[in-house]
Image (cartoon, grey):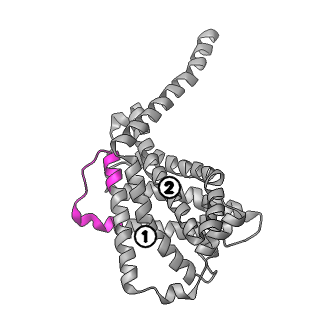
């Protein structure tokens, strides 16, 4: 009996490893099917013309002079020293940002922002193999854009209270990680039109945040030195180029996390038996 239990225990890691390999293979194949690279590049382009200008405007209007926004970007990129200073200068509060902001400019930002949510919705629909939503469901994209901005602001300004104290990192980590899981969980549910169960979408939200954490580690090793060198060589435009490359990585994480969640769902017998709806 004991020998049988030992054999069973010895097989458990193998079964787990086989399932992990199956999910990884499914993620790779599904990523090729939906053209993950092109979607990530489109995600970065739309983010660059939407969120980056909008965050600069918000930072300029902030009474904290953009400390929260710039610190959140710096923390997400894993920067320090000269590279952190370059990003801080990009998001520093300036009166001319507010004076040159027009209603037409804000309307353009809103248009591109809704386009970003449309791209994410289309990717989610392809990943989960559901039909495209009707045109009149555009309100979901508007709500999703508002939710994204809200999450960024909460995560960014979580670095302002108790600044330079021991409790501050814990507050920021909680707001960024727990808030990120809740946001991407809700975002999938919203953009998919409630056609996929909450419990089915949770693994994808967790995988997305885990991928973003991995991107932060990668950014500290790769993007931080690039920002420092490009800021010296090319100035602000050099920093912008690196931030654009980082946004491509963010797009990969957002879509690959959802793909991993869908692959996990198909690899789980009980969930697959009861169906996604």
Left or right of residue 24, residue 120 in this image = left
Q: Is residue 126 visible?
A: yes
Q: Compared with residue 79, is residue 98 higher up or lower down, i.e. above or below?
A: below
Residue at image position (77%, 63%) is 166
Classify residue 122 by image quadrant.
bottom left
Q: Nearer the viewer, residue 161 or 115?
A: 115
The residue tagged 1 is 49
Classify residue 59 by image quadrant.
bottom right
- The residue segment tinted magenta is 122-141
Q: Compared with residue 25, is residue 256 higher up or lower down, i.e. above or below?
A: below
Q: Nearer the viewer, residue 261 or 102?
A: 102
The residue tagged 2 is 250
Quarter placement of the N terminus? top right
Position of residue 180 measured from the top left corner of the image (x, y, whole percent)? 53, 57
Marks 1/2: CA–CA distance: 15 Å
Dot 2 falls on a residue whose secondary structure is helix
Q: Is residue 216 magenta?
A: no
Residue at image position (37%, 74%) is 110
Position of residue 196 measured from the top left corner of the image (x, y, whole percent)? 34, 49
Q: Compared with residue 112, is residue 23 higher up or lower down, i.e. above or below?
A: above
Classify residue 155 by image quadrant.
bottom right
**Furthest residue toward front:** 233
Q: Residues within 10 Å of mark 1 (few under 14, many from 20)?
A: some
Badge 1 or badge 2: first in the primary sequence? 1
């Amino acid at each position: 009996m004991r020998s049988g239990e030992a054999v069973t225990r010895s097989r458990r890691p193998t079964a787990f490893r086989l399932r992990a390999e199956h999910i990884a293979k499914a993620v790779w194949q599904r990523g090729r099917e939906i053209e993950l690279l092109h979607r990530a590049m489109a995600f970065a382009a739309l983010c660059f013309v939407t969120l980056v200008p909008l965050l600069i405007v918000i930072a300029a209007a902030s009474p904290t002079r953009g400390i929260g926004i710039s610190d959140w970007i710096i923390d997400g990129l894993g920067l320090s020293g000269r590279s952190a200073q370059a990003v801080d200068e990009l998001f520093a509060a300036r009166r001319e940002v507010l004076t040159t902001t027009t209603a037409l400019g804000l309307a353009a930002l809103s248009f591109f922002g809704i386009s970003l949510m449309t791209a994410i919705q289309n990717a989610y629909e392809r990943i989960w193999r559901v039909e495209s939503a009707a045109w009149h469901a555009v309100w979901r994209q508007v709500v999703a854009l508002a939710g994204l901005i809200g999450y960024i602001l909460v995560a960014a300004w979580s670095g302002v209270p108790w600044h330079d104290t021991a409790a501050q990192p814990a507050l920021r980590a909680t707001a960024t990680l727990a808030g990120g899981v809740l946001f991407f969980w809700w975002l999938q549910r919203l953009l998919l039109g409630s056609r996929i169960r909450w419990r089915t979408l949770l693994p994808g939200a967790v995988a997305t945040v885990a991928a973003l954490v991995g991107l932060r580690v990668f950014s500290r090793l790769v993007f931080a030195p690039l920002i420092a060198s490009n800021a010296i060589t090319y100035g602000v435009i050099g920093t912008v180029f690196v931030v654009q490359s980082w946004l491509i990585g963010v797009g990969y994480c957002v879509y690959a996390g959802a793909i991993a969640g869908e692959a996990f769902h198909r690899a789980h017998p009980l969930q697959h038996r009861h169906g996604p709806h």
